[in-house]
Amino acid sequence: MHSERPRHPSGTAGEALQSCDGEGEQGLCPVLAAVGVIGTEWRLAIVHRLLEGPQRFSEILRSNARLNAKTLSATLKFLEGVVQRTVVSTRPFSVVYSLTEMGLGLAPAARELRQWGTRWLLPRRQAALRAGAAARRTPVIEGELPRLSAAQPEPRAKA
């Protein structure tokens, strides 16, 4: 028995989704190919940062406290073709990274992902943080002093 898949209400989006059910005309699903290029958090974060304009390596590195130099270097090398590396001939020389035409083409997708995250993910995270903070609070009866835990005496070192 063959069951027909439900179609997406809008024709263009539905067609785009269906084109990746099997292999496309050239044996390539455009969605999967795009995710292969920008599919990690660091790749997309770097592209998003470079949408603000050309940046030096150190500026990109400082833009996120969790990003380290090794990861940034490897990611910039992977993004060759999306990101352009330009050596500025000054003393000492510096390297500036910017988006190529292909990279600039990711701007609408990056903006949409940011809006989606702001709408759907930030409220959930904030609610989870509030719930976690409420669970960690010691319940206090109105008018009662806060409870203090008795400190354990530290063992003394033998002389």
Image: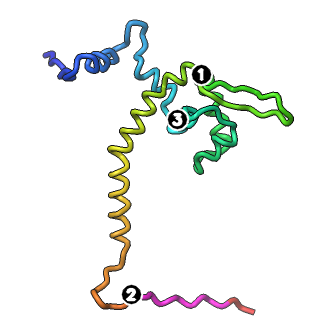
**Up-down relation of residue 123 to residue 115 (above or below):** below
Q: Is residue 38 left or right of residue 156?
A: left
Q: Residues within 10 Å of mark 3 (few under 14, many from 20)?
A: many
Q: Contact (CB < 8 A) between labels 3 and 2?
A: no
Measure how far apart labels 3 and 2 are at the Cα level.
Answer: 46 Å
- The circle drawn on residue 146 is 2
Indicate the amino acid at tag 1. Thr
Indicate the amino acid at tag 2. Pro
Question: Residue pushed farthest bottom?
Answer: 159
Q: Main secondary structure of the magenta part?
A: loop
Q: For residue 43, which quarter of the picture?
A: top right
Q: Residue 63 location, x and y as percent?
A: 60, 45
Measure how far apart labels 2 and 1 are at the Cα level.
Answer: 59 Å
Check disc 3 and report its element: helix, strand or loop. helix
- The circle drawn on residue 100 is 1
Magenta residue span: 148-156
**Up-down relation of residue 62 to residue 108 (above or below):** below
Q: Residue 88 location, x and y as percent?
A: 77, 29
Q: Residue 94 location, x and y as percent?
A: 77, 34
Indicate the amino acid at tag 3. His
- The circle drawn on residue 48 is 3
Residue 151 belongs to magenta span: yes
Q: Nearer the viewer, residue 102 or 8?
A: 102
Measure how far apart labels 3 and 1 are at the Cα level.
Answer: 13 Å
Q: Nearer the viewer, residue 42 or 96?
A: 96
